[in-house]
């Protein structure tokens, strides 16, 4: 479980400050970039199915749009806080900059639990959210997308409301739409595949082969499933996955020494990425405690579940065999654990580089919407591979040249690009 005292924004600012010191960023730019440019916090009154009015709180934070329109998802979560949204919007700025796409960083959310809301109530929240922000988001301003507990359906309700307000079609308003309604082929695979494109390049640099490197993965949702699939396709083996059990909402590690079989596991997995632990032993899986994924004798760790998972408490439980950590999740490693990983000389592919495949494909979706012409899946994935590979190479080259930790090198590139855009615009 995420620690309640953990504040994602404090962590995001600490990471920023570290790089700002390294690159001797001037005071004005530092002040501008360590805080969001704009924040919206608003109420969304909804008449619930039983007739009473419930008032939800919504957020949108636009961290920086010097390089292009803001980009970032909308999360529906009962524990959502403005600080989490601030942190995520800042990470979006660095993510778009490190893969060099012409977009800035934003994030949004609503404090609510979709598990307890009917479809009609969720639709009203979506329409209410976009009504509050119709003048402050848009294809050339700030482009939302799905995120935790929001889906293509939520995006379509928002798009529809926006188009009613403006009386015209704006498919570029929002990404993550269904294919056939302005969505891009390849988006479902994009984040997980992106993780593996960067991992493939890291292994090449370390002179290792997927066929000789075994991986352990935390998470079995969208990112993890496609990451495992592509890693298998490259000849690599994944021996453990950790995720929630479908029934008791506790995490477990499901281990199979010969390698997990993704299609077999999917048969006992629900749509939230939870595995049914009562059925796993029948398929030959050992069921271990949730934390066991990090203690496996493997060369590769892929945290792809949630933030704050590799911590000071468990980082030393990692096997000495671990050579690469590819961060599929956002913010899975705390700064304390990060220092230990750096000290051990483990090659890390930092979150905002490793999991940038999703936003890169969302950018492709916008481009295709603007052209009103859609590419085949192979073309999307080919372009994605090119973008991810060249972003990875730029970061690893800088890391090598200046003897930087990979996360630091990625921050240096991203922050320098955004700072330069702010300077070029005459903001600082
Ligand atoms: P998802 O909801 O599809 O899957 C999450 C998985 O993590 C599930 O298998 C769940 O059981 C597991 N999980 C949750 N808490 C856990 C815990 N404490 N211990 C073990 N397992 C746990 O989510 P996703 O889309 O795969 O996203 C995973 C991570 O990647 C998140 O941090 C998300 O912000 C990040 N991310 C996702 C995308 C994307 O395109 N989906 C893009 C960038 C970053």
Image (spheres, rainbow, N blue to C red):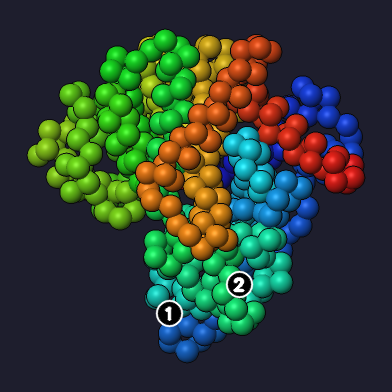
Camera-side residue of 41 and 227 = 227
Camera-side residue of 316 and 90 = 90
* Image quadrant in which the N terminus is located: top left
Mark 2 = which residue?
Answer: 130
Locate residue 427, reporting x and y percent.
88, 46
Q: Is residue 425 left or right of residue 195?
A: right
Residue 221 image label: none
Residue at 65% in and 65% down: 138
Residue 347's place in the image compared with 57, above or below, is above
Q: Is residue 289 visible?
A: no
Q: Nearer the viewer, mark 2 or mark 1?
A: 2
Q: Quadrant of residue 99?
A: top right
Locate residue 342, reporting x and y percent.
57, 16
* Image quadrant in which the C terminus is located: top right
Camera-side residue of 31 and 294 = 31
Mark 1 = which residue?
Answer: 120
Counting residues from the start of the chain, the first of labels 2 and 1 encountered is 1
Locate residue 128, reporting x and y percent.
58, 76
Q: Among all residues in the image, which is located at the extreme bottom? A: 51
Residue at 66% in and 73% down: 134
């Amino acid at each position: 479980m995420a620690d309640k005292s953990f504040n994602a924004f404090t962590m995001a600012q600490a990471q920023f400050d570290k790089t700002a010191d390294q690159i001797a960023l001037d005071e004005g730019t530092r002040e501008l970039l360590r805080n969001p440019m704009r924040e919206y916090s608003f109420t969304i009154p909804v008449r619930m199915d039983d007739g009473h009015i419930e008032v939800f709180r919504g957020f949108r934070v636009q961290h920086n749009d010097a390089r292009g329109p803001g980009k970032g998802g909308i999360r529906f979560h009962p524990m959502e806080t403005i600080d989490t949204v601030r942190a995520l919007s800042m990470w979006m700025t660095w993510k778009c900059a490190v893969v060099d796409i012409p977009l800035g960083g934003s994030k949004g959310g609503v404090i609510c639990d979709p598990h307890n809301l009917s479809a009609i109530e969720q639709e009203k929240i979506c329409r209410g959210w976009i009504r509050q922000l119709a003048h402050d988001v848009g294809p050339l301003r700030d482009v939302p997308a799905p995120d935790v507990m929001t889906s293509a359906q939520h995006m379509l309700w928002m798009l529809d409301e926006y188009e009613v307000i403006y009386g015209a079609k704006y498919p570029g308003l929002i990404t993550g739409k269904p294919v056939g309604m302005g969505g891009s082929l390849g988006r479902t695979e994009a984040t997980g595949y992106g993780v593996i494109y960067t991992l493939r390049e890291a292994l090449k640099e370390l002179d290792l082969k997927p066929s000789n490197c075994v991986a352990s993965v935390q998470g079995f949702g969208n990112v993890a499933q496609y990451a495992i699939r592509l890693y298998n396709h490259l000849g690599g083996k994944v021996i453990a996955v950790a995720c929630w059990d479908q029934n008791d909402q506790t995490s477990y590690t499901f281990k199979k020494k010969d390698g997990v079989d993704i299609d077999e596991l999917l048969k006992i997995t629900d749509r939230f990425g939870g595995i049914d632990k009562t059925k796993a032993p029948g398929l030959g899986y050992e069921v271990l405690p949730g934390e066991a994924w990090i203690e496996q004798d493997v060369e590769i760790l892929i945290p792809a579940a949630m933030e704050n998972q590799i911590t000071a408490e468990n980082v030393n439980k990692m096997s000495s065999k671990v050579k690469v950590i590819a961060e599929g999740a956002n913010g899975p490693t705390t700064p304390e654990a990060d220092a230990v990983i750096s000290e051990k000389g483990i090659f890390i592919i930092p979150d905002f580089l490793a999991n940038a495949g999703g936003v890169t494909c969302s950018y492709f979706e916008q481009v295709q919407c603007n052209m009103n012409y859609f590419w085949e899946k192979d073309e999307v994935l080919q372009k994605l591979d090119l973008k991810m590979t060249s972003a990875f190479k730029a970061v690893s080259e800088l890391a090598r040249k200046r003897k930087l930790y990979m996360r630091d090198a990625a921050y240096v590139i991203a922050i320098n690009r955004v700072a330069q855009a702010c300077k070029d615009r005459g903001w600082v």
